[in-house]
Amino acid sequence: LCMISERGYDLQDMHVWHRDKSWVLEKNEITRFPHGVLEIKLEMGGGNLTPPKWVTDLQNSGMLYECHKYSKYVHGCAALMPDEVRAVPYWIDDISLRQSILESDGGRVLADPEEGVGPGATAV
């Protein structure tokens, strides 16, 4: 999953809303999210609050990592616009994401390893 910044381009009076695919991406314009994203929505009507067996099996498989309220948009903003965000999402300091954020020059939003906490809203 790649997230690409589309900011700062000539929109030609709002007739062109996307970046030209021939332009070379700078390293701070793309972040490569190292995981797949799976969202399952269930209609649990009629008083039945038990999810289907396949959902329970998947949840218990050990192949999923739940990330409550994860947002690709929020993640992309934090990783690609570190100088403009006021706060960062709680998952940003997950060790599995660190390298991809550093590679896109978004390291400013990561926790200081010596302090063990992220910068928070006042420092970013």
Image (cartoon, rainbow, N blue to C red):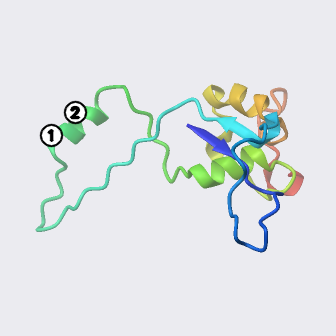
> What element does badge 2 sit on?
helix
Q: Quadrant of residue 6?
A: bottom right
Residue assigned mark 2? 57
User: Which of the pair 5/40 is nearer the observer?
Assistant: 5
x, y percent for residue 40:
32, 49
Residue assigned mark 1? 53
The residue lying at 77 percent from left, 34 percent from top is: 104
Q: Which amino acid type is shown beneath numbered disc 1?
A: Lys
x, y percent for residue 39:
38, 48
User: Which of the pair 47/109 is nearer the observer?
Assistant: 109
- As displayed, is residue 33 above or below residue 87? above
Instruction: Left or right? Give the position of 62 relative to 19.
Output: left
Distance from disc 2 to disc 1, alpha carbons, whole Å, reads 6 Å
Q: In the image as oriented, which residue stretches furthest toward the bottom? A: 13
Q: Residues within 10 Å of mark 2 (few under 14, many from 20)?
A: few
The residue lying at 61 percent from left, 26 percent from top is: 96
Instruction: Left or right? Give the position of 46 relative to 19.
Output: left
